[in-house]
Amino acid sequence: MKVLILSDIHANYTALQAVLRDAGQVDQIWCAGDLVDYGVCPHETVAWFRSHGVRCVSGNHDRHLLHILQTGETEAYRGTKMYKWAHDNCERVTPEDIHYLEQLPMHLSLQADGIAYLLQHQMGEGSLAYQMPESLHAFDDFWQSWYTGSACGERRMIFGHTHRRCVHQLDDRVLWLNPGSVSYRRPDDPDKRAHYMTIEDGVIHFHAVAYDRSDSLARAMAYVRSGSMMTTELQDAMFFFGDAATSRDPLPEA
């Protein structure tokens, strides 16, 4: 079986399509959440997930968008320097997209090739948002709390959230992994490619593919010219989608 592992798409439909072309034929697609925010195509992204039977969990940015929709904050911030990509995304998703995000579970118990998987976006919340199971004891505690499938010999957890791809092995048949972000890196990583992972017959493979970032950059530049988005949000976009050397370079001239 070949499983495509995705995470942290962040409304980057162009990158998602590049990954799908690069990955080729797969049997299943699993996603560790964060379909929206920080990108320009939330509807196209969520609509694709809705129509392709992806096994997906909720990410913190998915829940953040839903919270903003509930508060009505977008209208108050529209056209001001308080406006963020999350507000932009709120204005682009459809009721069907919103329903899909609302019903995403926090955890999924899955199996492939005789291996048990526990899929989630992150391990903790708040100050523990970036905590990971660094010991076998922590892994076992988390597994026992959330895994609901039948027993298997080898156990693997899949996380997203950090945007840092890795495989962390705790025992001979116990590990956790992260496919990295389809959309963007952390500020210390200048790689602009879309990261993803495949697991074929139980073997983990890392992948990265370049994609056309021009549309995302053009949409961000429109906000630069209008002066109607938070500066740090646009600085992030210049780093992710443009040629800024850091995520806090001065914005280009409008």
Image (cartoon, rainbow, N blue to C red):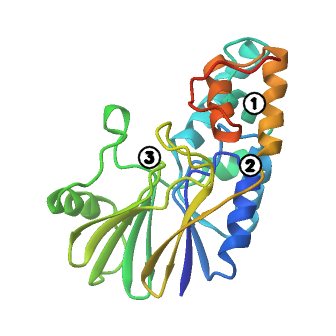
- Tag in front: 2 or 1: 1
Residue at 55% from the left image edge and 77% from the top image edge:
3
Work out whether residue 247 or residue 104 is closer to the camera in this orientation and state it: 247
Residue 162 badge: 3
Query: Vertical placement of 65 versus 214: above or below?
Result: above
Residue 18, image x and y in percent?
73, 63
Bin the neighbour count of mark 1 within 10 Å (Cα to Cα): few under 14, some 14-19, many 20 and up.
many
**Residue at (72%, 19%) from the top-left corner?**
229
Does residue 15 lie above or below 254 as drawn? below
Mark 2 and mark 1 lie on one chain; the one further toward the N terminus is 1
Element marked by disc 1: helix
- Give, as a three-letter code, the residue at label 3: Thr
Which circle, 3 or 1, is nearer the viewer? 3
Residue 128 location in percent, x, y?
A: 31, 38
Left or right of 41 on screen, residue 31? left
Residue bearing mark 2: 97
Q: Inspect this view and state whether residue 93 appears.
A: no
- SS at mark 2 in the image: helix
Q: Looking at the picture, how far across and down is residue 23, in whole percent?
A: 65, 74
